[in-house]
Image: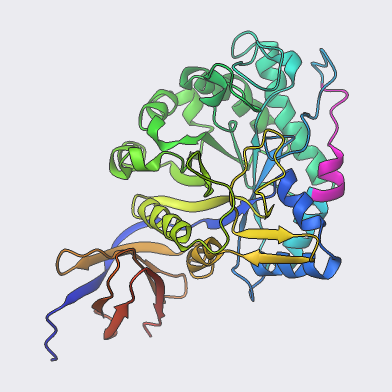
Amino acid sequence: MCLFSGLRLTIVPYQKYQKIRGFGGAMTDAAAINIMSLSAGTQDQLLRQYFSTEGIGYSVVRVPMASCDFSTRLYTYADTDGDYNLDNFTLAPEDIQMKIPLLQRAQAFSPHPLSLLASAWSAPAWMKTNGALIGKGSLKGQPGGKDYKTWAHYYIRFFEEYAKYNLTFWALTTGNEPSAGQMTNYSFQALGFTPEEQRDWVALDLGPALHASSYPHIHILILDDNRLLLPHWAKVVLNDVHAGKYIHGVAVHWYMDSLVPAEISLGVTHHLYPEYYLFGTEACAGWRPLDRGVKLGSWNRAEQYAHDILQDLNHYVVGWTDWNLALDRTGGPNWVKNFVDSPVIVDAQRDVFYKQPTFYSMAHFSKFLWEGSQRVGVSASGETDLEFSAFIRPDGSVVLIILNRSSSEIPFEVWDPAVGHIACTAPAHSLLTLAWNTH
């Protein structure tokens, strides 16, 4: 037996936690515009990088229902005043000419069915208290009333229209960032809900409508907002049996994560409601006022991604979805100039795209953590700056992902009781994945 004085990481296979659903990004209008701005061959290459086996194996795509800030105009699918039957519900040119063809092509490159996730930013203006898509406002009336019922029906109509193009959805969220629609003068599309309103809307309108539709299998994910709203939001909604029976999971965004420890938000929520899964639905770099927009080649942002994903995975999250799949060099288009960064930056003039360090950060997870992989225990022999998480994949192989954000290299040894040990080193500012078979 060789003596090893340094750090030892031991896999503990009998400590079993959550199973992975998948990783991916969002097909916003802006992402679609940027991908379509490239030549056909370059478009295929970009989609292949994300979705094929030779690429990084994305399996989740978040699809905004109508416009958001990453659109070039404000619209919904039912902008006819007073159309409570949604007789004039119609998809936009953005869907028919861009998002849908790109999703079909992404699906063709992927060896498995993609898990599509639908999120709406705002209801039509005529259904809202403020009469506008932007700013502070919620649905008129009360849950159970005609505006809330029509808003539930709007989701069903969306699924029906996408189904005509052979695109079926895995899940929906109850609406992007409901807290935004409670903020005075909020600058882009939002729809306010309190947790009580969300609970009652799911129980009285959305849940029953989905259940009675052709899509009862579609998962309902609540919150779709920052984890600082947990565990309170989950308590209000999930303690209600009438709402809870329709709900599958809790969706979280990564903004302001540094203000809220994962344990008191994600951890507590999981321990209170273990039968509901946690899922990351939005994250991007370059959103902070002092650190805005695109930074080509930023390793720091790749570390931020890896740190957040590892922290989420170590607190029961089953998947993590990046924001725009592709943006231009200014971080747009975005009609309210809310420019941010993306793992893929497109330069249409030169017909090229750049894969950012964050792209490779995502790859360490999306490429190695196949659906059904189960997180297992890892014990460290002492204090360390390394961040890590271990998984056993469906074929029995083990994956250990390690992040070293420190400025010194850290030698360590990995022990797996099934196969023995391996000596390894994590260079300064590095992200590495170890994978091995156990039989």
Colouring chosen for the image of the structure: rainbow
35, above or below 227, in the image: below
The quarter of the picture where residue 126 lies is: top right
Q: What residue appears at the point 84 percent right and 37 percent down from the top-left corner?
A: 92
The image shows a total of numbered marks equal to: 0
The quarter of the picture where residue 266 lies is: top left
- Relative to 303, 72 lies left or right: right
Q: Where is residue 296 in the image (x, y as percent from the top left)?
A: 58, 61
Q: Which residue lies furthest to the top in this view?
A: 141
- Residue 317 lies in the magenta stretch: no
Q: Position of residue 428 (x, y in %)?
A: 33, 72
The quarter of the picture where residue 382 lies is: bottom left
The foreground one among 259 and 320 is 259
Residue range in magenta is 86-98
346, above or below 165, in the image: below
Q: Position of residue 91 (x, y in %)?
A: 83, 36
The foreground one among 138 and 108 is 138
Q: Position of residue 334 (x, y in %)?
A: 70, 40
Q: Residue furthest front?
A: 290
Whether residue 111 is visible to the viewer of this picture, yes or no, is no
Question: Which image quarter is the C terminus in?
Answer: bottom left
